[in-house]
Amino acid sequence: MFFRKKPSKPSWKSAPDSADVGAEKRKHYRVPRGSTEPIWVSLMCEAKAPIGGDCVDLSIGGTVVEFDAARDPNLAAGDTCTLRICASSQNHAINATCRVVAVRPLDKGWTRIAFEFTNRIELYAQLDEYYARLFNRRRQMRVIPGYDIRIPVTLTWKTGSLATTVHDISAEGLGLKIPLEKGEALARIPVVDIALRLPKERADIVLRGAIKSRTHFAKTCLLGIEFSTEGDVEHAFDVLRGFIQERLVLLQAWNEKSAKRKAS
């Protein structure tokens, strides 16, 4: 779900194609406030100057940016665009092709826009070791299954069940993107039983999880679920950590190949 920032007077620093970055973090998964550096985000516009926004959320799947009244880009759900994302300590930036999935007006003329990264291959090719950490701004690294990998998952609760596939996963929890109508069945369900099958595994991983967030887009809902550590679940977490580490190794190999291609 989207989180409203505490009322405060926005301040903008002078930086090329950039704007001050909000420090809002989620209670779960996100790293503590102040432990990550500011990130500049600019909406790249044809024939006019980039529009700087306030980045309040960043992941490998997308970002949430807030614009003040003077910088409102007038975007609507479904629009496509390019964002320039730059850490304050780095000389190079990440250019990401995006699609607008939600636009929400805030107080005092501010607008909050959720962007989904639509070209993951393009994005991965730009992520060196430094930026890979920033695009996983969580206590535990989160990964997205490859395009050729589907991780089936079934949620069950007292009055129903839901079968879908994993959108992203970490050693602490997972994200599930489901149709809005199916999300309604889980609107008042705080805890679910989870069964998921990772690649190369012969049996399901069975855990319990608490639904910690519900982010509504135009036609889908992204559920954020935190795994419970109660019970005899250490083997399940070992399998999860092994899968995540394997994905991170593949990402690093991709980055190294991309760096060699650029150098040549």
Image (cartoon, rainbow, N blue to C red):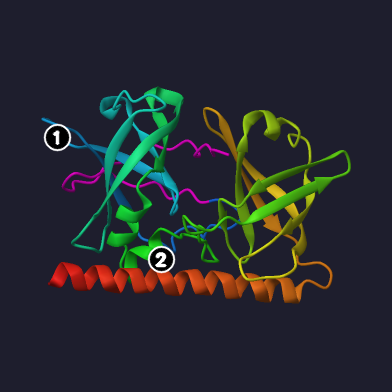
The front one of 190 and 36 is 190
- Residue 93 on image: x %, y %: 23, 56
**Could you tell me what secondary structure mostly forms the magenta stretch?**
loop
**Dot 2: element:** helix
The residue wearing badge 2 is 133
**Dot 1: element:** loop
Instruction: Identify the mark nearer the N-term, 2 or 1.
Output: 1
Mark 1 neighbour density, 10 Å: few (under 14) some (14–19) many (20 or more): few
| Circle 1: residue type | Ala
| Circle 2: residue type | Arg
The residue wearing badge 1 is 49
Residue 62 visible in the current orientation? yes
Q: Are marks 2 and 1 in contact (CB under 8 Å)?
A: no
- Location of the C terminus (image quadrant): bottom left
Within the image, what quadrant is residue 169 found in?
bottom right
The front one of 161 and 3 is 161
Residue 38 visible in the current orientation? no
Within the image, what quadrant is residue 77 found in?
top left
- Residue 32 on image: x %, y %: 52, 61
Highlighted magenta segment, given as a residue range: 1-25
